[in-house]
Amino acid sequence: MNTQIRLQPIAIAGAGLLGRLLAWRLRLLGHDITLFEAGKLQPDGNTTRAAAFTAAGMIAPLSEAVVSDVNVYRMGQFALQRWPEWLKDLPQNDLPQHTPDLFFAKGSLLVAHPQDESELQQFESELNFVVPECRNYQRVSSRDIQNLEPDLSPHFMHGLLLQEEGHLHNREFLQQLGDELIRLGIKIRENTPVETGPQTIHTDTGVEKFDWVIDCRGLGAKNRLQKLRGVRGETLHVETSEIHLQRPVRLMHPRYQLYVVPKPANRFVIGATQIESEDRSPVTLQSSLELGSALYTLSPAFAEARIIEMDTNLRPAFMDNLPKIFCKPGLIIANGLFRHGYLLAPAVVEQVLAQIAQTQHILFPDLLQVSTPG
Ligand SMILES: Cc1cc2nc3c(=O)[nH]c(=O)nc-3n(C[C@H](O)[C@H](O)[C@H](O)COP(=O)(O)OP(=O)(O)OC[C@H]3O[C@@H](n4cnc5c(N)ncnc54)[C@H](O)[C@@H]3O)c2cc1C
């Protein structure tokens, strides 16, 4: 434990992605942490869960930069270094046998059907425009695609291998981290929706005082952050032993873009729609048909896969779709991770840690707003 830092009682609101990570990293520094969660630490599929459980767990700086900006790419590069370092601090003894590891840096593969190959060219042009310094991708031929992912349909003639991307078995990670937070002695207050203020947490039963309050409630902070919105995303989960993928595969298509991400136990997450709506109701028939039929074209062997889950959630986003950290004495609010939560979390977490330690160190200047949220 670091004895240079003054150890403080800190409350964290929200045990989704950011809340769990911050509780963990701050506890490892020796702080006294209380974590408030409106739902449960290990939620089942029947209740509203953190967006972190719906996410596919891709850490895709190149793919995401093309739909956002160069800062997302830079924070993504930072994430690809930080995740394996952090994971060394997580005991993995309880992992089931089929989960040898949680984080993979095997890149991702973009493919397009022969009639849609202009989509690949367009992606490459946009990538070079948004991230001119990026060299870490490679055009691949039909034979390369078969060598990389032998179970994909052989009709893909060209693709792009984005070496500088990774993926995480995020649900397994969240569950293990939840267990670790308990083992580390963090006080966890489940089923406790809260409101936040400088040094104060408001629960149904009263007000509690801390040195710092960190608000990581995702979309639950909407009443405080008026410019925050939810962006609906739907995913399918399928299971099949007929197909093995080493890395996420994205299908570039003029109307809808699909990704498939390999998960433990022959599972795959297929996603995701992106709809400007705060509707949390179940996956629509149209979305399931589009995701399912696009998946089938990646490999007909997916036809026999069993659909084991359909999931819907809302991505917390500001109008510019970029994350923000608002700071004032006794209160830090971190939010707006949109569709890049696992990619942005290391940069956001490190910045919040620097703020608590009052080091004045600003890693990514565009992230930090020392002001009251609007
Ligand atoms: C379909 C989909 C696919 C995605 N895929 C990816 C991906 O591949 N890669 C990637 O990087 N990102 C992905 N994301 C984005 C990622 O999931 C989010 O950016 C991330 O989860 C946001 O983290 P957060 O901690 O801010 O919010 P959340 O993870 O949503 O956590 C917020 C927590 O706060 C709790 N809470 C809410 N209100 C209160 C209250 N009043 N009191 C106490 N607790 C409260 C909630 O119960 C929840 O546990 C995806 C998202 C979706 C929806």
Image: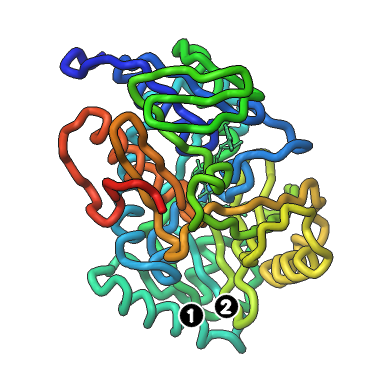
Question: Disc 1 residue type?
Answer: Leu
**Residue drawn where x is 80% and y is 52% of the image:** 307
Residue 168: percent from left, percent from top? 50, 43
Which type of secondary structure does the marked residue at label 1 adopt?
A: helix
In-front residue for pair 313/114: 313
Q: Which residue is mark 1?
A: 120
Q: Which residue is mark 2?
A: 112
Q: Is residue 236 above or below residue 176?
A: below
Q: Is residue 141 above or below residue 90?
A: below
Q: Quadrant of residue 129?
A: bottom left
Q: Cβ–Cβ below 8 Å for labels 2 and 1?
A: yes
In-front residue for pair 111/193: 193
**Residue drawn where x is 59% and y is 45% of the image:** 51
Viewed as shown, does residue 238 lie left or right of 350? Answer: right
Q: Earlier in the sequence, mark 2 or mark 1?
A: 2
Name of the residue lying farthest toward the front: 206
Residue 300 in view, yes or no: no
**Residue drawn where x is 47% and y is 38% of the image:** 216
Q: What is the number of callouts on the image?
A: 2
Q: Quadrant of residue 253?
A: bottom right
Gap between marks 2 and 1 measured at Cα: 7 Å
Residue 97: percent from left, percent from top? 61, 27
Q: Is mark 1 within 8 Å of ligand 1?
A: no
Q: Quadrant of the N terminus?
A: top left
Q: Quadrant of residue 232?
A: bottom right
Question: Disc 2 residue type?
Answer: Ala
- Disc 2 crowd rating (10 Å Cα; few below 14, some 14-19, many 20+) is many
Q: Which mark is residue 203?
A: none
Q: Report the coloring of the rendering.
A: rainbow
Viewed as shown, does residue 127 lie left or right of 300? Answer: left
